[in-house]
Amino acid sequence: MDLGSILQTIFNFENYGELLALVQNSIWAGAVLGLLGGLVGTFVMKRDLAFAVHGISELSFAGAAFALLIGADIIFGSLAGSVAAALLLGLMGVRARDKNSIIGVIMPFGLGLGILFLALYEGRAANKFGLLTGQIVSVDTVQLQALAGTAVVVMIALAAIWRPLSFASGDPEMAEARGVPVRGLAIGFMVMLGVSVALSIQIVGALLVLALLITPAAAALRVTTSPRLVVLLSVAFAVSATVGGILLALGSRIPISPYVTTLSFLIYVVCRVIGSVRAKRGLMGRVTREAAPAAAA
């Protein structure tokens, strides 16, 4: 089978317009989650919590799998698992070394529990697969409203603590000396992160949640050091990856997560190349400026 035949078996855009009209809620949901992921991701990078996101996602997966097993709401189960993991990390992982150790314990435990619950589940295999790879092609109005409402609450809470959280993320010792409640902010942000992870799992699944909460912000940091521009670019990259992934998945029989993760990765690669080129130009310009006075002398 040649490449053209393979692509034809994967992609089919014949009824794309009709499908597009049916997934408007999914597109809006993707945009909302991209916005939330871009905002939260900036602080994830500032606070060096990329590993924590992975740990939280494993317990979120376990909570969702347990909810699926007992016939409860999957989103509620995912939220319960995420918030429990986030609170545990926020309360116990004070020092970076302790936090990494705790995450290293939580990850295999959560993954093992999730696999156990899925093994006991006797329902549709697609439901099991969706928890790992994401499924957002059938979001109804009620689900969209609940998703958007939860995301808005998280974003309002994040906006309320934005300045002290930025201070505490950049220089926690100085912030604590100035009377900023560093520990309370850390726990509060971990709860927000847990909720964001649970919501993001609907898009890319438990195993690939880093594509929304890490990659866009990491890409933005490669091209700018401006705090405001980092936030704007992070949001733009996250929304582009999620909505773009949904639009590509409509004409394909492949789950949405490979498209979201690939788009995020490509954005990061482009930003990394741009950042490297700028750094080289800056270095060459500095060398030229330093060499000019010596040549004149």
Image: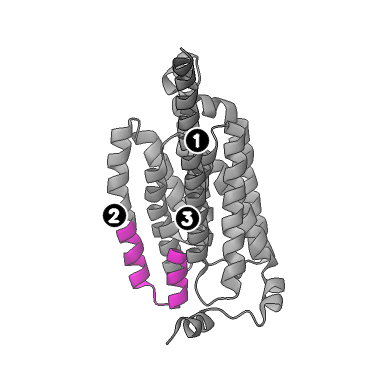
Residue 101, picture quadrant = top left
Q: Position of residue 37 (x, y in %)?
A: 55, 48
Residue sticking out furthest to the bottom: 1
Residue holding disc 1:
281
Q: Amino acid at mark 1?
A: Arg
Q: Residue at x 49, y 85 (%)?
A: 5
* Magenta stretch encompasses residue 120: yes
Among the two numbered marks 2 and 3 on one chain, the one whose residue lies closer to the N terminus: 2
Q: Position of residue 48 (x, y in %)?
A: 41, 37
Q: Position of residue 9 (x, y in %)?
A: 51, 84
Q: Residue at x 45, y 78 (%)?
A: 124
One can see residue 23 in this view: yes
Depicted 87 relative to depicted 135: above or below: above
Among the two numbered marks 3 and 1 on one chain, the one whose residue lies closer to the N terminus: 3
Q: Amino acid at mark 3?
A: Phe
- Segment tinted magenta in the rendering: 111-133
Residue holding disc 3:
265
Q: Residues within 10 Å of mark 3 (few under 14, many from 20)?
A: some
* Magenta stretch encompasses residue 9: no
Q: CA distance from mark 2 to mark 3?
A: 25 Å
The N terminus - image quarter: bottom left
Residue holding disc 2:
108
Q: Residue at x 27, y 47 (%)?
A: 105
Could you say whether the residue bearing mark 1 is in a helix, strand or loop? helix
Question: Depth check: 234 or 225 in front?
Answer: 225
Q: Nearer the viewer, mark 3 or mark 1?
A: 1
